[in-house]
Amino acid sequence: MKVLVIYVDEFNYIPAQKNLESAEDVTEGATFSESILAFIQVEKSDEENDVKSREKKLVNHLKWTARKNNCQKIILHSFAHLADSKASVEFTKKIFDEAEKRLQNGGYETAQTPFGYFLDLNIKAPGHSLARIWASL
């Protein structure tokens, strides 16, 4: 799993193009402030492990990043451009949903960008050392 985390002062998206036929229809965008934005790519090799172990590793990393940025809001964004290998849609979505539940149970405000869409993105991010963190989990 590859993760690029960016602390954002402001982030918004607008659905541009549906690229997964089974995705639910989404027409509205959303705006967030003072949040952790996590670009996540679940890889094929992640499927060799169970969902719970991979989801837990992701959540631990996101919590660590949130603490370092003194932040309680986390946005999960599926971004299949961080590695060559991609896990199945079903496995990836399950990790996202389980990670979101675990984060909420830990007191974090969470959101997911629409799964199965290309999005128009606007990102305003500060330039300090822990505002951008990349990891291979």
Image (spheres, grey):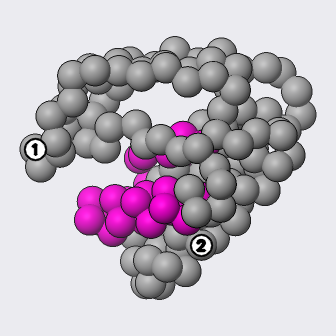
Name the amino acid, label 2: Lys
- Nearer the camera: disc 1 or disc 2: 2
Closer to the chain start, of discs 1 and 2, is 1
**Residue 56, numbered label:** 2
In the current view of this chain or complex, which residue is farthest to the bottom? Answer: 49
x, y (%) of residue 101? Answer: 48, 62
x, y (%) of residue 3? Answer: 60, 51
Q: Which residue is mark 1?
A: 21
* Left-right relation of 18 to 80: left
Q: Quadrant of residue 93?
A: bottom left
x, y (%) of residue 59? Answer: 62, 63
58 above or below 79?
below
Give the residue at x 53% y 74%: 54
Name the amino acid, label 1: Glu
- Residue 17 is a magenta residue: no
* Highlighted range, magenta: 74-103
